[in-house]
Amino acid sequence: MSFFTGDQTIFFVDDDAVLREANAQTLDLAGLAVETFSEASGVLRRISADFPGIVVTDIRMPGMDGLELRAAIHAIDPGIPVILITGHADVAMAVRALHDGAFDFLAKPFASDHLVGVARRALAHRALILDNRRLTAAAAAIDSPLIGESSAMLRLRETIAQLAQADIDVLIEGETGTGKELVAHMLHRQSRRSAASLVAVNCAALPQELAEAELFGSDLLDRATGKLGQAGRIRSAHRGTLFLDEIDTMHGAVQAKLLRVIEEREVQPIGASAPEPVDLRVVAATKTDLMDAVRAGAFREDLYYRLHVVKLRIPPLRERRGDIPQTFAYFLDEAAAKMGLKAFQIGDGVRRHLVEHDWPGNVRELKNFAYSVVLDLPSDPGLSSMPADASLAERVGRFEATIINDTLTQTQGNIAETMARLGIPRKTLYDKMQRHGIDPKPFRG
Protein backbone atom coordinates (compact mmCIF):
# COMPACT_ATOMS: atom_id res chain seq x y z
CA MET A 1 0.00 0.00 0.00
CA SER A 2 1.96 3.01 -1.29
CA PHE A 3 0.21 5.43 1.09
CA PHE A 4 2.47 4.36 3.95
CA THR A 5 6.15 5.23 4.08
CA GLY A 6 8.18 2.74 2.09
CA ASP A 7 11.77 3.44 0.99
CA GLN A 8 13.79 5.27 3.63
CA THR A 9 17.33 6.64 3.61
CA ILE A 10 19.92 7.32 6.29
CA PHE A 11 22.07 10.43 5.79
CA PHE A 12 25.38 9.68 7.53
CA VAL A 13 27.62 12.70 8.23
CA ASP A 14 31.26 12.45 9.38
CA ASP A 15 34.37 14.35 8.28
CA ASP A 16 36.53 11.25 8.95
CA ALA A 17 36.45 9.37 5.62
CA VAL A 18 37.54 6.02 7.13
CA LEU A 19 34.91 6.02 9.87
CA ARG A 20 32.29 7.39 7.50
CA GLU A 21 32.72 4.59 4.98
CA ALA A 22 33.06 1.87 7.64
CA ASN A 23 29.76 2.85 9.31
CA ALA A 24 28.06 3.25 5.94
CA GLN A 25 29.13 -0.29 5.04
CA THR A 26 27.72 -1.57 8.36
CA LEU A 27 24.34 0.00 7.61
CA ASP A 28 24.40 -1.19 4.02
CA LEU A 29 25.11 -4.79 5.07
CA ALA A 30 22.12 -4.57 7.41
CA GLY A 31 19.93 -3.80 4.41
CA LEU A 32 19.53 -0.10 5.16
CA ALA A 33 19.89 2.52 2.42
CA VAL A 34 22.56 5.07 3.31
CA GLU A 35 24.12 8.18 1.76
CA THR A 36 27.31 9.69 3.17
CA PHE A 37 28.33 13.33 3.62
CA SER A 38 31.60 14.86 4.77
CA GLU A 39 30.03 18.13 5.96
CA ALA A 40 26.75 19.47 7.27
CA SER A 41 26.01 21.86 4.40
CA GLY A 42 25.56 18.99 1.93
CA VAL A 43 22.90 17.44 4.16
CA LEU A 44 20.94 20.64 4.64
CA ARG A 45 20.64 21.09 0.89
CA ARG A 46 18.87 17.72 0.73
CA ILE A 47 16.59 18.01 3.78
CA SER A 48 12.92 18.98 3.47
CA ALA A 49 9.84 18.62 5.68
CA ASP A 50 8.80 15.45 3.85
CA PHE A 51 12.24 13.76 4.07
CA PRO A 52 11.40 10.10 4.78
CA GLY A 53 14.68 9.16 6.47
CA ILE A 54 16.93 10.01 9.40
CA VAL A 55 20.27 11.71 9.97
CA VAL A 56 23.26 10.23 11.83
CA THR A 57 25.97 12.80 12.47
CA ASP A 58 29.24 13.14 14.32
CA ILE A 59 29.28 16.03 16.79
CA ARG A 60 32.88 17.15 16.22
CA MET A 61 33.17 18.46 12.66
CA PRO A 62 34.77 21.56 11.11
CA GLY A 63 32.42 24.36 10.17
CA MET A 64 28.89 23.49 11.33
CA ASP A 65 29.13 20.81 14.03
CA GLY A 66 26.63 18.04 14.71
CA LEU A 67 24.71 20.00 17.37
CA GLU A 68 24.23 22.94 15.03
CA LEU A 69 23.21 20.57 12.24
CA ARG A 70 20.61 19.00 14.53
CA ALA A 71 19.16 22.43 15.31
CA ALA A 72 19.09 23.41 11.61
CA ILE A 73 17.35 20.15 10.63
CA HIS A 74 14.73 20.54 13.34
CA ALA A 75 14.07 24.09 12.22
CA ILE A 76 12.98 22.52 8.91
CA ASP A 77 11.11 19.59 10.50
CA PRO A 78 11.34 18.72 14.22
CA GLY A 79 10.05 15.26 13.41
CA ILE A 80 13.24 14.13 11.60
CA PRO A 81 15.22 11.87 13.96
CA VAL A 82 18.84 12.95 14.43
CA ILE A 83 21.30 10.51 16.02
CA LEU A 84 24.52 12.02 17.38
CA ILE A 85 27.91 10.30 17.46
CA THR A 86 30.08 11.50 20.29
CA GLY A 87 33.42 10.85 21.94
CA HIS A 88 33.67 10.08 25.64
CA ALA A 89 34.36 13.71 26.52
CA ASP A 90 31.19 14.89 24.80
CA VAL A 91 28.69 12.51 26.45
CA ALA A 92 27.31 15.19 28.76
CA MET A 93 26.86 17.47 25.76
CA ALA A 94 25.01 14.70 23.89
CA VAL A 95 22.70 14.09 26.86
CA ARG A 96 21.76 17.77 26.84
CA ALA A 97 21.09 17.43 23.11
CA LEU A 98 18.57 14.67 23.86
CA HIS A 99 16.58 17.17 25.91
CA ASP A 100 16.75 19.56 22.96
CA GLY A 101 15.24 17.00 20.59
CA ALA A 102 17.99 14.62 19.42
CA PHE A 103 16.65 11.08 18.94
CA ASP A 104 19.60 9.25 20.52
CA PHE A 105 23.39 9.29 20.72
CA LEU A 106 26.14 6.74 20.21
CA ALA A 107 29.30 7.03 22.32
CA LYS A 108 32.51 5.95 20.58
CA PRO A 109 33.49 3.20 20.32
CA PHE A 110 30.12 1.57 19.64
CA ALA A 111 29.22 -1.89 18.36
CA SER A 112 27.96 -2.14 14.80
CA ASP A 113 24.74 -3.88 15.90
CA HIS A 114 24.09 -0.97 18.28
CA LEU A 115 24.29 1.46 15.36
CA VAL A 116 21.95 -0.69 13.29
CA GLY A 117 19.46 -1.10 16.14
CA VAL A 118 19.25 2.62 16.90
CA ALA A 119 18.96 3.43 13.19
CA ARG A 120 16.10 0.93 12.73
CA ARG A 121 14.17 2.42 15.66
CA ALA A 122 14.68 5.93 14.34
CA LEU A 123 13.51 4.92 10.85
CA ALA A 124 10.40 3.28 12.30
CA HIS A 125 9.74 6.40 14.37
CA ARG A 126 10.07 8.63 11.29
CA ALA A 127 7.78 6.40 9.23
CA LEU A 128 5.06 6.65 11.88
CA ILE A 129 5.37 10.43 12.02
CA LEU A 130 4.94 10.73 8.24
CA ASP A 131 2.14 8.16 8.12
CA ASN A 132 0.19 9.96 10.83
CA ARG A 133 0.62 13.24 8.99
CA ARG A 134 -0.71 11.64 5.82
CA LEU A 135 -3.68 10.17 7.69
CA THR A 136 -4.53 13.59 9.10
CA ALA A 137 -4.28 15.20 5.68
CA ALA A 138 -6.30 12.37 4.09
CA ALA A 139 -9.13 12.81 6.59
CA ALA A 140 -9.21 16.57 5.95
CA ALA A 141 -9.36 16.05 2.16
CA ILE A 142 -12.50 13.90 2.16
CA ASP A 143 -15.39 15.62 0.38
CA SER A 144 -17.75 12.69 -0.18
CA PRO A 145 -19.34 10.17 2.20
CA LEU A 146 -18.25 7.46 -0.26
CA ILE A 147 -14.54 7.54 0.51
CA GLY A 148 -11.73 6.57 -1.84
CA GLU A 149 -9.63 7.90 -4.70
CA SER A 150 -9.16 4.62 -6.57
CA SER A 151 -10.36 4.51 -10.16
CA ALA A 152 -13.19 2.16 -9.13
CA MET A 153 -14.50 4.60 -6.51
CA LEU A 154 -14.13 7.63 -8.78
CA ARG A 155 -16.21 5.83 -11.41
CA LEU A 156 -18.76 4.76 -8.81
CA ARG A 157 -19.27 8.33 -7.56
CA GLU A 158 -19.61 9.62 -11.14
CA THR A 159 -22.14 6.89 -11.97
CA ILE A 160 -24.17 7.65 -8.84
CA ALA A 161 -24.38 11.33 -9.82
CA GLN A 162 -25.60 10.38 -13.30
CA LEU A 163 -28.12 7.77 -12.12
CA ALA A 164 -29.51 10.04 -9.41
CA GLN A 165 -30.83 12.40 -12.07
CA ALA A 166 -32.08 9.60 -14.34
CA ASP A 167 -34.72 8.47 -11.80
CA ILE A 168 -34.60 4.79 -12.78
CA ASP A 169 -34.57 1.69 -10.60
CA VAL A 170 -31.13 0.49 -9.49
CA LEU A 171 -29.75 -2.80 -8.23
CA ILE A 172 -26.73 -2.49 -5.92
CA GLU A 173 -24.39 -5.45 -5.48
CA GLY A 174 -21.70 -5.55 -2.82
CA GLU A 175 -20.33 -7.71 -0.05
CA THR A 176 -21.31 -7.21 3.57
CA GLY A 177 -20.03 -3.91 4.91
CA THR A 178 -19.18 -2.28 1.57
CA GLY A 179 -21.69 0.57 1.97
CA LYS A 180 -24.74 -0.41 -0.05
CA GLU A 181 -27.13 1.63 2.09
CA LEU A 182 -24.82 4.64 1.83
CA VAL A 183 -24.98 4.40 -1.98
CA ALA A 184 -28.78 4.21 -1.81
CA HIS A 185 -28.88 7.36 0.32
CA MET A 186 -26.55 9.15 -2.11
CA LEU A 187 -28.81 8.22 -5.03
CA HIS A 188 -31.78 9.62 -3.12
CA ARG A 189 -30.14 12.82 -1.85
CA GLN A 190 -28.86 13.77 -5.31
CA SER A 191 -32.21 13.07 -7.03
CA ARG A 192 -35.31 15.18 -7.56
CA ARG A 193 -36.96 13.01 -4.89
CA SER A 194 -34.71 14.29 -2.10
CA ALA A 195 -37.50 16.41 -0.58
CA ALA A 196 -39.48 13.23 0.14
CA SER A 197 -38.44 10.24 2.25
CA LEU A 198 -36.10 7.37 1.63
CA VAL A 199 -37.81 4.37 3.21
CA ALA A 200 -35.36 1.56 4.01
CA VAL A 201 -36.51 -2.04 4.38
CA ASN A 202 -34.23 -4.81 5.60
CA CYS A 203 -35.83 -7.77 3.87
CA ALA A 204 -33.86 -10.26 5.95
CA ALA A 205 -35.37 -8.85 9.15
CA LEU A 206 -38.99 -9.06 7.98
CA PRO A 207 -40.85 -11.96 9.61
CA GLN A 208 -42.51 -13.99 6.85
CA GLU A 209 -45.97 -13.79 8.42
CA LEU A 210 -45.77 -9.99 8.73
CA ALA A 211 -43.83 -9.18 5.56
CA GLU A 212 -46.85 -8.46 3.34
CA ALA A 213 -48.48 -6.09 5.83
CA GLU A 214 -45.17 -4.36 6.53
CA LEU A 215 -44.45 -3.79 2.84
CA PHE A 216 -47.83 -3.42 1.16
CA GLY A 217 -49.85 -2.16 4.10
CA SER A 218 -53.26 -3.25 5.37
CA ASP A 219 -56.69 -1.66 5.26
CA LEU A 220 -58.16 -4.24 7.64
CA LEU A 221 -59.39 -3.23 11.08
CA ASP A 222 -57.02 -4.21 13.86
CA ARG A 223 -59.24 -5.96 16.44
CA ALA A 224 -56.76 -5.35 19.22
CA THR A 225 -56.57 -1.57 18.76
CA GLY A 226 -59.81 -0.84 16.91
CA LYS A 227 -57.83 1.11 14.30
CA LEU A 228 -57.31 0.59 10.60
CA GLY A 229 -54.16 -1.26 9.61
CA GLN A 230 -50.81 0.24 8.72
CA ALA A 231 -49.88 2.22 5.62
CA GLY A 232 -46.98 -0.08 4.72
CA ARG A 233 -43.45 0.82 3.66
CA ILE A 234 -44.27 1.08 -0.05
CA ARG A 235 -47.00 3.68 0.44
CA SER A 236 -44.73 5.55 2.88
CA ALA A 237 -42.16 5.89 0.08
CA HIS A 238 -44.65 7.70 -2.21
CA ARG A 239 -42.80 10.43 -4.17
CA GLY A 240 -39.56 9.23 -2.59
CA THR A 241 -37.25 6.21 -2.72
CA LEU A 242 -37.90 2.65 -1.55
CA PHE A 243 -34.67 0.93 -0.52
CA LEU A 244 -34.94 -2.87 -0.32
CA ASP A 245 -31.81 -4.18 1.40
CA GLU A 246 -30.88 -7.89 1.21
CA ILE A 247 -33.62 -8.44 -1.34
CA ASP A 248 -32.17 -11.88 -2.07
CA THR A 249 -33.72 -13.04 1.25
CA MET A 250 -37.28 -12.00 0.31
CA HIS A 251 -39.91 -14.75 0.47
CA GLY A 252 -41.27 -16.00 -2.86
CA ALA A 253 -44.89 -14.94 -2.19
CA VAL A 254 -43.75 -11.40 -1.40
CA GLN A 255 -41.60 -11.35 -4.54
CA ALA A 256 -44.72 -11.95 -6.66
CA LYS A 257 -46.57 -8.99 -5.14
CA LEU A 258 -43.48 -6.76 -5.37
CA LEU A 259 -43.22 -7.53 -9.09
CA ARG A 260 -46.65 -5.92 -9.62
CA VAL A 261 -45.58 -2.82 -7.69
CA ILE A 262 -42.51 -2.40 -9.87
CA GLU A 263 -44.30 -3.14 -13.15
CA GLU A 264 -47.46 -1.11 -12.56
CA ARG A 265 -46.29 1.39 -9.94
CA GLU A 266 -49.32 0.58 -7.86
CA VAL A 267 -49.86 -1.21 -4.58
CA GLN A 268 -52.86 -3.05 -3.19
CA PRO A 269 -52.86 -3.21 0.61
CA ILE A 270 -54.29 -6.28 2.35
CA GLY A 271 -58.06 -5.93 2.50
CA ALA A 272 -58.21 -3.10 -0.06
CA SER A 273 -60.77 -3.41 -2.86
CA ALA A 274 -58.51 -1.85 -5.49
CA PRO A 275 -54.87 -0.93 -5.96
CA GLU A 276 -53.67 2.64 -5.57
CA PRO A 277 -50.89 4.34 -7.57
CA VAL A 278 -47.50 5.04 -6.03
CA ASP A 279 -44.78 7.30 -7.38
CA LEU A 280 -41.49 5.91 -6.20
CA ARG A 281 -38.06 4.83 -7.20
CA VAL A 282 -36.90 1.36 -6.20
CA VAL A 283 -33.31 0.78 -5.14
CA ALA A 284 -32.55 -2.83 -4.21
CA ALA A 285 -29.37 -4.24 -2.69
CA THR A 286 -27.90 -7.72 -2.43
CA LYS A 287 -24.68 -9.12 -1.03
CA THR A 288 -24.81 -12.08 -3.44
CA ASP A 289 -25.17 -12.43 -7.20
CA LEU A 290 -28.95 -12.44 -7.72
CA MET A 291 -28.59 -14.44 -10.93
CA ASP A 292 -27.17 -17.30 -8.86
CA ALA A 293 -30.33 -17.16 -6.75
CA VAL A 294 -32.41 -17.18 -9.94
CA ARG A 295 -30.60 -20.29 -11.20
CA ALA A 296 -31.12 -21.94 -7.82
CA GLY A 297 -34.87 -21.21 -7.99
CA ALA A 298 -34.72 -18.95 -4.93
CA PHE A 299 -35.48 -15.70 -6.75
CA ARG A 300 -37.97 -14.89 -9.50
CA GLU A 301 -36.32 -14.34 -12.87
CA ASP A 302 -38.92 -11.77 -13.99
CA LEU A 303 -38.40 -9.76 -10.79
CA TYR A 304 -34.63 -9.92 -11.28
CA TYR A 305 -34.86 -8.34 -14.73
CA ARG A 306 -37.29 -5.69 -13.48
CA LEU A 307 -34.84 -4.70 -10.76
CA HIS A 308 -31.81 -5.05 -12.99
CA VAL A 309 -32.41 -1.88 -15.05
CA VAL A 310 -29.01 -0.61 -13.92
CA LYS A 311 -26.59 -2.48 -11.69
CA LEU A 312 -24.05 -0.80 -9.44
CA ARG A 313 -21.26 -2.95 -7.99
CA ILE A 314 -19.40 -1.71 -4.93
CA PRO A 315 -15.88 -3.20 -4.91
CA PRO A 316 -14.65 -4.76 -1.65
CA LEU A 317 -11.69 -3.20 0.16
CA ARG A 318 -9.32 -5.96 -0.93
CA GLU A 319 -9.80 -4.84 -4.54
CA ARG A 320 -8.98 -1.21 -3.72
CA ARG A 321 -6.40 -1.44 -0.98
CA GLY A 322 -5.12 2.04 -1.80
CA ASP A 323 -8.38 3.45 -0.37
CA ILE A 324 -7.89 1.80 3.03
CA PRO A 325 -5.67 4.49 4.64
CA GLN A 326 -7.95 7.41 3.76
CA THR A 327 -11.06 5.51 4.80
CA PHE A 328 -9.39 4.50 8.06
CA ALA A 329 -8.26 8.11 8.60
CA TYR A 330 -11.84 9.32 8.29
CA PHE A 331 -13.13 6.85 10.89
CA LEU A 332 -10.12 7.47 13.15
CA ASP A 333 -10.86 11.20 13.05
CA GLU A 334 -14.55 10.54 13.67
CA ALA A 335 -13.83 8.25 16.63
CA ALA A 336 -11.30 10.65 18.16
CA ALA A 337 -13.81 13.52 17.91
CA LYS A 338 -16.48 11.44 19.65
CA MET A 339 -14.02 10.58 22.43
CA GLY A 340 -13.07 14.25 22.84
CA LEU A 341 -9.52 13.80 21.51
CA LYS A 342 -7.98 16.58 19.42
CA ALA A 343 -5.67 14.22 17.54
CA PHE A 344 -4.72 10.56 17.50
CA GLN A 345 -1.51 8.82 16.47
CA ILE A 346 -1.33 5.23 15.22
CA GLY A 347 1.43 2.81 16.12
CA ASP A 348 3.38 0.29 14.07
CA GLY A 349 1.06 -2.60 14.97
CA VAL A 350 -1.96 -0.70 13.63
CA ARG A 351 -0.14 0.18 10.42
CA ARG A 352 0.88 -3.47 9.88
CA HIS A 353 -2.71 -4.61 10.38
CA LEU A 354 -3.98 -2.05 7.85
CA VAL A 355 -1.49 -3.28 5.26
CA GLU A 356 -1.66 -7.04 5.86
CA HIS A 357 -5.32 -7.70 6.74
CA ASP A 358 -7.79 -8.73 3.99
CA TRP A 359 -10.81 -6.92 5.55
CA PRO A 360 -13.55 -9.48 4.84
CA GLY A 361 -16.00 -7.20 6.68
CA ASN A 362 -14.99 -4.32 4.38
CA VAL A 363 -15.71 -0.71 5.40
CA ARG A 364 -17.81 -1.73 8.39
CA GLU A 365 -14.95 -3.82 9.78
CA LEU A 366 -12.47 -1.00 9.10
CA LYS A 367 -14.69 1.45 10.99
CA ASN A 368 -14.94 -0.91 13.97
CA PHE A 369 -11.17 -1.31 13.94
CA ALA A 370 -10.66 2.48 13.95
CA TYR A 371 -12.93 2.83 16.97
CA SER A 372 -11.18 -0.03 18.79
CA VAL A 373 -7.81 1.64 18.17
CA VAL A 374 -8.99 4.96 19.61
CA LEU A 375 -10.53 3.13 22.57
CA ASP A 376 -7.18 1.35 23.04
CA LEU A 377 -8.70 -2.12 22.77
CA PRO A 378 -6.53 -5.13 21.70
CA SER A 379 -6.02 -4.78 17.95
CA ASP A 380 -3.82 -7.72 17.01
CA PRO A 381 -5.95 -9.83 14.61
CA GLY A 382 -4.47 -13.00 16.04
CA LEU A 383 -5.48 -11.99 19.55
CA SER A 384 -8.85 -10.42 18.88
CA SER A 385 -10.96 -13.53 18.38
CA MET A 386 -11.82 -13.94 22.08
CA PRO A 387 -14.81 -16.24 22.68
CA ALA A 388 -17.89 -14.52 24.01
CA ASP A 389 -17.85 -16.69 27.16
CA ALA A 390 -14.15 -16.11 27.93
CA SER A 391 -13.42 -15.50 31.60
CA LEU A 392 -12.05 -12.21 32.92
CA ALA A 393 -8.66 -13.85 33.50
CA GLU A 394 -8.55 -15.02 29.86
CA ARG A 395 -9.48 -11.57 28.60
CA VAL A 396 -6.85 -9.86 30.78
CA GLY A 397 -4.24 -12.41 29.72
CA ARG A 398 -4.99 -11.87 26.05
CA PHE A 399 -4.74 -8.10 26.51
CA GLU A 400 -1.45 -8.47 28.38
CA ALA A 401 0.01 -10.63 25.60
CA THR A 402 -1.00 -8.01 23.03
CA ILE A 403 0.80 -5.25 24.94
CA ILE A 404 3.97 -7.34 25.32
CA ASN A 405 3.97 -8.26 21.62
CA ASP A 406 3.46 -4.62 20.57
CA THR A 407 6.23 -3.40 22.90
CA LEU A 408 8.71 -6.05 21.69
CA THR A 409 7.92 -4.96 18.14
CA GLN A 410 8.61 -1.32 18.99
CA THR A 411 11.90 -2.13 20.76
CA GLN A 412 13.09 -4.66 18.13
CA GLY A 413 13.15 -7.34 20.85
CA ASN A 414 15.37 -5.30 23.20
CA ILE A 415 14.56 -6.78 26.62
CA ALA A 416 16.02 -3.92 28.66
CA GLU A 417 14.05 -1.32 26.74
CA THR A 418 10.90 -3.46 26.91
CA MET A 419 11.30 -3.73 30.70
CA ALA A 420 11.71 0.04 30.96
CA ARG A 421 8.65 0.80 28.80
CA LEU A 422 6.44 -1.67 30.65
CA GLY A 423 7.84 -0.74 34.07
CA ILE A 424 8.41 -4.33 35.20
CA PRO A 425 11.54 -6.24 36.35
CA ARG A 426 13.33 -8.72 34.09
CA LYS A 427 12.08 -11.84 35.90
CA THR A 428 8.46 -10.67 35.70
CA LEU A 429 8.79 -9.96 31.98
CA TYR A 430 10.31 -13.39 31.25
CA ASP A 431 7.65 -15.10 33.37
CA LYS A 432 4.88 -13.37 31.43
CA MET A 433 6.51 -14.13 28.05
CA GLN A 434 6.82 -17.81 29.04
CA ARG A 435 3.19 -17.88 30.18
CA HIS A 436 1.97 -16.43 26.87
CA GLY A 437 4.40 -18.39 24.69
CA ILE A 438 6.21 -15.27 23.45
CA ASP A 439 9.74 -15.66 22.09
CA PRO A 440 11.69 -12.34 21.84
CA LYS A 441 14.13 -13.65 19.21
CA PRO A 442 11.91 -13.13 16.11
CA PHE A 443 11.51 -9.45 17.05
CA ARG A 444 15.27 -8.80 16.75
CA GLY A 445 16.64 -7.47 13.47
Image (spheres, rainbow, N blue to C red):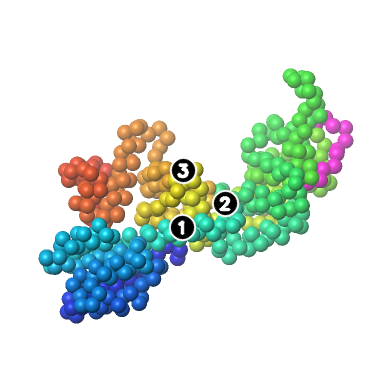
Q: Residue furthest right?
A: 274
- Three-letter residue code for mark 2: Thr
- Using a 10 Å C-alpha cutoff, classify the residue at mark 1 as few (fewer than 14 neighbours), some (14 to 19) or many (20 or more): many
SS at circle 1: helix
- Report the residue at 51% width, 53% height from top: 330
- What residue is shown with label 2? 178
* Magenta residue span: 270-280
- Report the residue at 81% width, 48% height from top: 263
Of callouts 1 and 2, the N-terminal one: 1
Residue 234: mark: none
Main secondary structure found in the magenta portion: loop
- What residue is shown with label 3? 340
Q: Tell me: residue 124, above or below residue 333.
A: below
Nearer the observer, disc 2 or disc 3?
A: 3
Q: Tell me: residue 151, above or below residue 13.
A: above
* Quadrant of the rendering where the C terminus is positioned: bottom left
Residue 135: mark: 1
- Three-letter residue code for mark 3: Gly
Q: Can residue 304 be seen in the rendering of this structure? A: no
Quadrant of the rendered structure where residue 1 is?
A: bottom left
Nearer the observer, disc 1 or disc 2?
A: 1
Is there a contact, CB below 8 Å, between mark 2 and mark 3?
no
Quadrant of the rendered structure where residue 190 is?
A: bottom right
Nearer the observer, disc 3 or disc 1?
A: 3
* Residue 326 position in % (x across, y down): 50, 57
Q: Can residue 187 be seen in the rendering of this structure? A: yes
Please state if 363 lies on the left or on the right of 313 as rendered.
left
* Residue 152 position in % (x across, y down): 59, 63
In this view, the residue in front, 19 or 181, is 19
In this view, the residue in front, 140 or 394, is 140
